[in-house]
Amino acid sequence: MDKYQYAAYGSNLHPLRLSRRVPSAKLLGTNFVASLELRFNKKSDKDGTGKCNIVNGGDGVHVAVYEIDLVQKVILDRIEGLGYGYREKAINVPGHGDCRAYVADEEAIDDSLEPVDWYKEIVILGCRYHDFPVGYLSQIEVIPASSDSDEKTSREEWDLVEVLRNGA
């Protein structure tokens, strides 16, 4: 079966989160990509909040590299909104070579956005799972976040946060 490498840097960092979305996802490892920066500036087409994006410049970004069955790429493309504010980009991850990642289209970027609290927490839990450096994690923790006005979504996502925290 054909496979490809995917570089997760945001809400798909945690292997449990990603494997629930794409069952074939297999963690290959993590690494640091210099001269990129993590931001929460991609406008969500669902709720208008800030989702993760990587941009050129900055002090670098930590990524988790997953191997995914090519037949399941369509699932991840749909979940990530490929063609709806995100485009695919190859990034060179040391030790892994070129990996696919989703980056925001220019028209979907708004640096004034904040993530919702549960989304930011999922990113933080992924960073902790992979034992990313404390300084990197601290930069994410200080980013302001707002409460989700959609009570149903908020409840469901906070339930997922609890599952990720407990490692179940």
Image (cartoon, grey):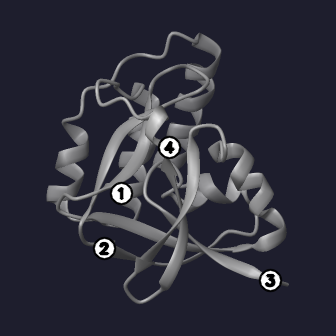
Label 1: which residue? 127
**Residue at position x 70%, y 54% from top?**
76
Which quadrant of the rendered structure holds the N terminus? Answer: bottom right
Q: Identify the disc placed on residue 32.
A: 2
User: Dot 2, how many residues are within 10 Å of its Cα: few (below 14), some (14-19), or many (20+)?
Assistant: some
**Residue at position x 67%, y 60% from top?**
19
Asked whether the residues under the numbered discs 3 and 4 touch, taking CB atoms below 8 Å apart as contact, a structural biologist would say no
The mark that comes first in sequence, 3 or 4, is: 3
Residue 125: image location, x then y, percent: 40, 50
Q: Given the current orientation, which residue lies at the most extreme bottom position?
A: 95
The mark that comes first in sequence, 1 or 3, is: 3
Label 1 vs label 3: CA separation? Answer: 28 Å
Label 3: which residue? 2
Asked whether the residues under the numbered discs 1 and 2 touch, taking CB atoms below 8 Å apart as contact, a structural biologist would say no
Q: Amino acid at mark 2?
A: Phe
Q: Is residue 68 visible?
A: yes
Circle 2 SS class: strand
Q: Nearer the viewer, mark 3 or mark 4?
A: 4
